[in-house]
Amino acid sequence: MSVALRKLNALTIPKSSPNCKIRQARKRGIPFVISVDAHSTGALNYLKCGVHIARRGGLRKNEILNTLSASDFARAVRPAS
């Protein structure tokens, strides 16, 4: 079994508000990760934008997988046996 998650890509500026999609995924219990799809260290600066998108959508820190410790993250994405 695989783990479903929703990626918030901070490198792209959405044409429409992602808030509705974030709320729909939250209702379904789908966890999130914030990504910048960085191909250079300079692109890591977009992480703040991803945090802003997450906050606008009402996400809390405990709903974003890449805010977890390494062991908690591994446990969260480990396939169910």
Image (spheres, rainbow, N blue to C red):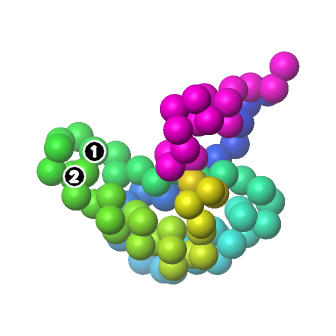
Left or right, 29 with respect to 7, comes to: right
User: Is residue 40 inside the magenta stretch?
Assistant: no
Picture coordinates of residue 71 (x, y %)? 58, 29
N-terminal of the pair, mark 1 or mark 2, is 1
Q: Which residues are magenta?
A: 65-81
Establish if 10 lies above or below 39.
below
The residue shown at (42%, 57%) is 9
- Write the residue at 62% across / 56% down: 62
Q: How many marks?
A: 2
What residue is rendered at 51% in x and 68% in y?
Answer: 54
Q: Secondary structure beneath disc 1?
A: loop
Q: Main secondary structure of the magenta part?
A: helix
In the image: residue 5, left or right of residue 66: right
Disc 2 target residue? 43
Q: Which residue is mark 1?
A: 38
Amino acid type indicated by mark 1: Ala
Quadrant position of residue 47: bottom left
Tell me which amino acid carries mark 2. Ala
Q: Secondary structure at mark 2?
A: helix
Q: Quadrant of the N terminus?
A: top right
Instruction: Kindly tell me whether residue 8 is visible in this rendering.
Output: yes
43 vs 15, left or right, is left
Give residue 22's position: percent from left, percent from top. Answer: 63, 68
Q: Quadrant of residue 81?
A: top right
Is any atom of residue 14 visible in this view? no
